[in-house]
């Protein structure tokens, strides 16, 4: 809504925004979405932080289950069979994650993700909280501040996340060949890890950067039919990027919790075969 401001004699009337004292005139539950988003993100951050710093109950030797939060396990304290790339010759100090190399890049990959940026900009930073709701900030600076500049490096974090997803896939395949008697076997842990890896691949491949890599710089799709098909497939996944983002968070927690409960002796793996 606009109103006309009376100018001095001879000047052109100026238009200014009407000042509404209320934060919003909306009567629906516009705050519910941002609230749930904040609770969801906070739950994942708190849970993941506590588990990473716990430095225990991350590996089930009997079936070779390794939680994604500790992969790849690089510290000298890691169980020998849990260290896919071997162990560094030094023990990590307390509170240093065993997966020191992968975790920062995975965090940055999600932190700079286009969807998650929208999620925490709206729910936590409140810029804006919702449509037709006044922001608490007096000015808009975009992503020009020093702490916001790494957002543009999302495409580079994608390459590292892609490599880590391949490692997670290997971690998922290994337990199939460590059944109860040492041969091929399938348990509930295998099923949970398969679902988790599928969600991780869905989230990674549906990334906007992946879509851009497939066909973002092509001037003619007709001259690149293979990349066009890849771009089309990734574009379909991209429509579900938000759902893969939340599903992968849920399956990461479920996988880690299942491995932790088994490693601590609280539960045993439900075996379907061998």
Image (cartoon, rainbow, N blue to C red):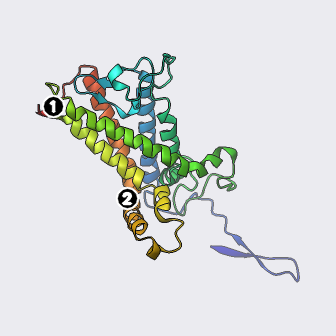
Mark 2, residue position: 240
Task: Tell me the number on the disc at residue 249.
Answer: none
Looking at the image, which residue is at 60% across and 55% down?
135
Looking at the image, which residue is at 43% across and 43% down?
163
- Position above or below: 16 against 166: below
Residue 179 position within the rendered picture, expressed as x and y whole percent measured from the top left: 17, 29
Q: Which residue extends farthest left?
A: 273
- Position above or below: 182 against 194: above
Secondary structure of the residue carrying tag 1 is loop
| Of the pair 40 and 178, the residue shown nearer to us | 178
Residue 98 position within the rendered picture, expressed as x and y whole percent measured from the top left: 45, 25
Q: Is residue 174 left or right of residue 86?
A: left
Mark 1, residue position: 270
Secondary structure of the residue carrying tag 2 is loop
Q: Residues within 10 Å of mark 2 (few under 14, many from 20)?
A: some
Q: Is residue 202 left or right of residue 37?
A: left
Residue 211 position within the rendered picture, expressed as x and y whole percent measured from the top left: 46, 60
Q: Is residue 264 left or right of residue 274?
A: right
Q: Quadrant of the N terminus?
A: bottom right
């Amino acid at each position: 809504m606009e109103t006309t401001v009376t100018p001095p004699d001879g000047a052109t009337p100026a238009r200014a925004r009407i000042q509404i004292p209320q934060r919003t005139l909306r009567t629906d539950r516009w705050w519910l979405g941002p609230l749930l988003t904040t609770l969801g993100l906070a739950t994942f951050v708190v849970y993941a932080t506590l588990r990473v710093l716990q430095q225990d109950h991350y590996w089930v030797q009997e079936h070779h289950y390794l939680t994604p939060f500790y992969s790849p396990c690089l510290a000298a304290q890691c169980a020998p069979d849990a260290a896919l790339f071997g162990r560094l010759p030094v023990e990590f100090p307390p509170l240093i994650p065993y997966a020191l190399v992968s975790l920062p890049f995975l965090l940055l990959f999600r932190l700079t993700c286009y969807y998650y940026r929208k999620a925490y900009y709206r729910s936590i930073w409140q810029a804006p909280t919702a449509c037709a709701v006044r922001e608490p900030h007096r000015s808009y600076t975009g992503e020009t501040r020093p702490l916001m500049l790494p957002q543009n490096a999302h495409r580079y974090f994608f390459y590292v996340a892609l490599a880590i997803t391949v490692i997670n896939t290997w971690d998922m395949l290994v337990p199939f060949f460590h059944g109860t008697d040492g041969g091929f076997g399938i348990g509930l842990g295998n099923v949970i890890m398969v679902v988790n890896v599928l969600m991780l691949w869905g989230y990674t491949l549906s990334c906007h950067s992946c879509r851009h890599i497939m066909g973002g710089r092509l001037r003619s799709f007709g001259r690149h039919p293979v990349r066009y098909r890849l771009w089309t497939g990734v574009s379909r996944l991209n429509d579900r990027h938000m759902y893969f983002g939340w599903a992968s968070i849920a399956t990461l927690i479920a996988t880690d919790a299942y491995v932790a409960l088994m490693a601590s002796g609280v539960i045993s793996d439900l075996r379907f075969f061998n």
